[in-house]
Structure formats: C-alpha cells, structure tokens
Image (spheres, rainbow, N blue to C red):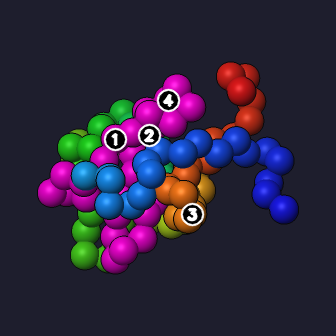
Amino acid sequence: MSDPNYKWFKVAASEEELIFPENGILELEVGGKTVCLGRFNGKLFAFAQKCPHAGGYFCKGWIDALGNVVCPLHRYKFNMETGRNVTGEGYYLKRWPVELREDGVWVAREKGFFF
Ligand code: FES
C-alpha cells in the first residue's frame, strides 16, 4: 500500500520525455514547487532545488563520478539516494520518492499545507 503521507504527481508520460541537460540535473515543477530531478546510472532521484547550505541552485551544479550531486557555490556534495552530505559539513539534502510506472514518471511530495 502506498504511503498515505505522500501525494504523487505525474511529471512525464515516459522517461524518454524527460530531456536532461548535460549535467544530468533537470528542474521540474511538482505539486506547485520546483524540485530537481537527477539522473545517474539509469536511476532517477528527486531532491531540493536549492542547497541546504546557502541556497545554491543545484541545476547549475553537477553529478560526480560516484553519483553525488555537487553544489556549484561551495561544492558541498550530497548523496542523491540518502541525502547524506558526503563532504561532512553536516547538512542534509531534502529528497522525494520517484517511481517509473507503466504510465510514466511519478514524483511524490509530502501531504501538508498545500495538498
Ligand atoms: S550553497 Fe551549496 S555548498 Fe554552499
């Protein structure tokens, strides 16, 4: 059974419909909020648009060889799967579940104030 704390949003009819820029980080609107979708080794990850350190925009960053998203401002790195700040500064990257379903790509957001 799906988690009742999340609401799911369809973001594309298929994975092929998602056109990623060269850095592998695409911005999308999900439930009225812009989030980033990162792609690494054929897997998709949804995470915050801005860095938890000082608000750097991840869409201007990059994904390193280990699959960490790197913030362009001060180059802190975050594991896209766990949100762990792998460079050790003690921040945490907000993430949301992503599912590839028969009818497309879906991203979940917590139910809360807006829906
Ligand atoms: S704003 Fe992202 S590392 Fe400082």
Instruction: Say which residue label 1 marks.
Output: 27
Along the polypeptide, which appears first: circle 2 or circle 1? 1
Discs 3/4, front:
3
* Label annotation for residue 35: 2
Report if the CB atoms under discs 2 and 3 are less than 8 Å apart: no
Along the polypeptide, which appears first: circle 1 or circle 3? 1
Mark pair 3, 4: CA separation = 22 Å
Q: Residue furthest top?
A: 114
Q: Nearer the viewer, residue 57 or 114?
A: 114
Element at label 1:
strand
Counting from the top left corner in percent of width and height, residue 90 is at 50, 54
Report if the CB atoms under discs 2 and 1 are less than 8 Å apart: yes
Q: Residue furthest left?
A: 22
Instruction: Say which residue label 4 marks.
Output: 33
Instruction: Say which residue label 3 marks.
Output: 101
Q: Is mark 4 within 8 Å of ligand 1?
A: no
Viewer can see residue 53: no
Query: What amino acid type should be assigned to the residue bearing mark 3?
Result: Arg
Query: What amino acid type should be assigned to the residue bearing mark 4?
Result: Lys
Report if the CB atoms under discs 1 and 3 are less than 8 Å apart: no
Mark pair 1, 3: CA separation = 20 Å
